[in-house]
Amino acid sequence: MTEAKKLFIKTYGCQMNVYDSERMVEAMGAEGYVLTDVVEDADMVLLNTCHIREKASEKLFSDLGRLRPLKNDKPGLIVTVAGCVAQAEGAEIQRRMPLVDIVVGPQAYHRLPQLVRAGGAQVDTEFPAEDKFDHLPKRTALRGPTAFLTVQEGCDKFCAFCVVPYTRGAEVSRPAERILREARDLVARGVREITLLGQNVNAYHGAGEGGAWTLSRLIRGLAKIDGLDRIRYTTSHPNDMDDDLIAAHGDLPQLMPYLHLPVQSGSDRILKAMNRKHTRDDYLRVIDRIRAARPDILLSSDFIVGFPGETDADFAATLDLIRSVEFGQAYSFRYSARPGTPAAEKPAVEAGVADSRLQQVQALLTAQQRSIQEAMVGREIGVLYEKIGRQTDQMVGKSDHLHAVHVNDPAGKVGQLVRARVLASSSNSLSAFRIS
Ligand code: SAH
Ligand code: SF4
Ligand code: F3S
């Protein structure tokens, strides 16, 4: 018997990349590859990359540099670069880093087995006409009771700072029936929570019975699947939060009370320069409507500070928006100029100023996150156990509001959905005891 070939995979960037990595593992699994977490043992190394900020892209080149001695020792090692840097820089990667054998874009990775079989230097960054999901094996690389499910990809919004419309291409939605089938299949394999993914997930408009389905219609369909206890979705754009999606947050107990709704800035002038196509007030109104439908919803967002032209007054408007919304969770980034985007042409805010703004915004967001988390103490919550904890008899899971929760539960099992009462809040998790 020949020994199985080993695949080492490293994933950078967003949850879509995590999902894509799982699908690539499955595709290579059908070719006889098994996963390893020891890079030195690998016959194939796959780096699934992110292009969103300069730092993310640079990581690829430093990681490739570190692979050089391994490739020298093992000339048969197949080095593959996938994901958004592959899409953005294509053949340039091989020119700069000759140790790279294969470059494959996010819309072409179903052809990875063919590229590997063909051997030699291969680049595939097409946006093929066929649907990659039709050419991938069934889901097997599952990580416990939660799973991601891509329903929509790409983006037509062209925010002035963002590479996603270029790396992921135009907005495309998968047909509803395929998604329902994939979800049923996941539930049959023990999944109890599904997070629907899309770069603009709430712009979903997949073909379905009776015409194009909206995201809310899809979620209502998923909520009928027996055994699917929790549904989440990410990432949404404020302009695509339609009435029925908001209503679904009030109607469906399976739809978790958490919403990641990036706003980027609280200044209308900057929002306009960012080509966000919504104002500060539009955003605040959406938040009011969501809170009316689901008062306990936890809100999350993304912020960019130091966008070209951002003044102290613009930045103050961002802090002010944060104070009036109160976010339970948030990500904030210093603006990073990306090649090929319109904003990259504009003069940058001084680095020291941008850094100080980032610190201020992060301090405010962290304080809000802490106080919302502390307000959970004493409350009853649902917890889905995802893994066994480091301490004896400890289970680790997520609450409905997506807080990490530790529960002392000697009888606990991965995949159980329990009721618990929150005992304490620490910097990034809650501890709770099980009620039922
Ligand atoms: N589709 C999502 C976000 C995709 S990128 C949306 O519409 O919001 C995730 C986050 O990265 C963005 O929300 C933004 O805050 C940040 N980001 C994107 N481009 C950036 C850049 N050039 N510099 C800094 N942050 C950026
Ligand atoms: Fe990027 Fe804007 Fe599209 Fe989000 S909506 S992926 S930030 S272009
Ligand atoms: Fe990065 Fe591509 Fe996701 S640029 S954030 S991996 S869509």
Image (cartoon, rainbow, N blue to C red):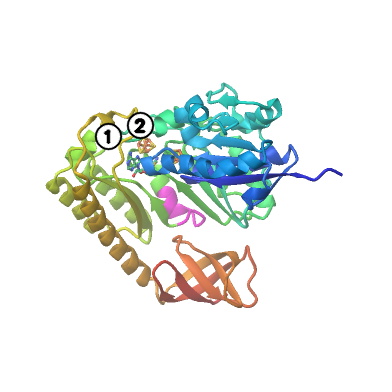
**Alpha carbons under labels 1 and 2: distance apart:** 9 Å
The answer to whether the residue bearing label 2 lies less than 8 angstroms from the nearest atom of ligand 2 is: yes
Task: Name the disc covering residue 277, or none.
Answer: 1
| Image quadrant in which you'd find residue 158 | top left
Q: Which of 36 and 375 is in front in this view?
A: 36
User: Where does the magenta region start and end?
Assistant: 247-256
Q: Residue 326 location, x and y as percent?
A: 28, 59
Task: Name the disc covering residue 157, or none.
Answer: 2
Q: Which amino acid does label 1 sit on?
A: Lys
Q: Residue 394 location, x and y as percent?
A: 58, 74
Q: Which residue is drawn at 49% across and 68% down?
A: 405
Q: Residue at x 62, y 49 (%)?
A: 39
Q: Residue 214 location, x and y as percent?
A: 47, 37
Q: Is mark 1 on a helix, strand or loop?
A: loop
- Inspect the magenta stretch and tell me whether residue 295 lies in it: no
Instruction: Tell me if mark 1 has few (under 14), some (14-19) or many (20+) residues whose alpha carbon lies within 10 angstroms of its own.
Output: some
Residue with the most extreme top position: 129
